[in-house]
Amino acid sequence: MMIIIAEFFVVILKVLWAFVTAGAKWVVRPKEKSVAGQVCVITGAGSGLGRLFAKEFARRRAILVLWDINSQSNEETAEMVRQIYHELDAPVTKDGPVGGVEEVPPFQPQVYTYVCDVGKRESVYSTAEKVRREVGEVDILINNAGVVSGHHLLECPDELIERTMVVNCHAHFWTTKAFLPKMLELNHGHIVTVASSLGLFSTAGVEDYCASKFGAIGFHESLSHELKASEKDGINMTLVCPYLVDTGMFKGCRIRKEIEPFLPPLKPEFCVKQAMRAILTDQPMICTPRIVYMVNFMKSILPFEAIVCMYRFLGADKCMYPFLAQRKEAMNNNEAKNGI
């Protein structure tokens, strides 16, 4: 009994120390780690946040492996990455053996592109094998690819619901199973889950999307605990949960107009900058903006009816309806053009 009590007090001290160290990071910004020369796989790299992640890692001289279902957009991202490499391609100098200065050839990072449908596990596994064979072992995995159906539940075809779940959630299992074994062997690596605030709290009209992001976050958290239980302290995990990002994915989504100036859609560049800082400082989770932390906490302690009242006040209860209406209108227009 005394042993349990002693351990309990040790746990309390460790919890308090965790609060202290977390608070210290607000005051003293942690040093960012170097990813130069490390192999970084980014899914959904052909556009949106994936493209911006690629550009940020390129600026830090990582070796980029870009996955996307769209070959053309993926190659466009690769060209942007090559341009960044070219701008960084300048000789460096170091002290010579006899006190002089000698020029050192700069490291030449490369970018590789692969067409991969992460919604098909066979495509994931075969592409991962190509990466290992042609590039090498992966150090950083950015699970970024995502889709949204844009339909109310009862109007959404089953195939689109399945597609949303597979790409946004199941694909994380397959990419992780493909690259985690070597990370475990080397006790080195970093896995990033690009989720959403809609994986922490939900809203009406996007049931499939919310479910997929809740699932991705559950997978991420469980895997994080498994790595801790395995004492693999060299493998880091970062969960990225941004508020609505202005990438066009949810074009038309609106909260109450009086509130919107205080909670505007996030600029994609800002979102990725914040995420990169979290990744490079091994931060376990980043919510952008910080009010997302508070909303998630309030959801955990307030009665459901209180949450509903808050949603209605903010206009968050039906914020997706304009987006869904636009998607439906666009689909009807396409059908009309095709003579359907």
Image (tube, rainbow, N blue to C red):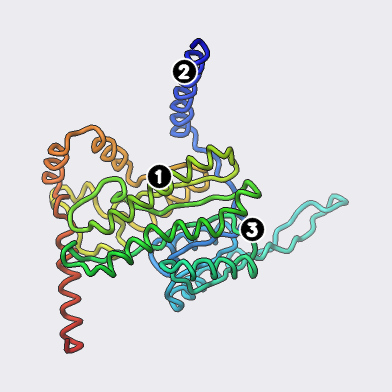
Please name the amino acid that badge 1 sits on. Ile
Nearer to us: label 1 or label 2: 2
At 58% from the left edge and 46% from the top edge, which residue is drawn?
33
Q: Helix or strand or loop: what does disc 3 sit on?
A: loop
* Residue position for label 3: 37
Badge 2 amino acid: Phe
In this rendering, the answer to whether 55 lies above or below 231 is below
| Residue at 28 percent of width and 68 percent of height | 160
**N-terminal label among 1 and 2:** 2
Q: Which residue is mark 1?
A: 286
User: Left or right of 68: which side holds 214?
Assistant: left
Q: Nearer the viewer, residue 119 or 251?
A: 119
Name which residue type carries label 3. Gly
**Distance (Cα) linking label 1 and label 3:** 25 Å
| Residue under pointer 2 | 8
x and y percentages locating residue 310 in the rendered image: 15, 41
Query: Badge 2, how many Cα within 10 Å: few under 14, some, many 20+?
Result: few
Earlier along the polypeptide chain: callout 1 or callout 3?
A: 3
Q: How many numbered badges does the structure rendering display?
A: 3
- Asked whether the viewer can see residue 278, the reply is no
Seen in the picture, residue 46 relative to 312 is either above or below; the reply is below
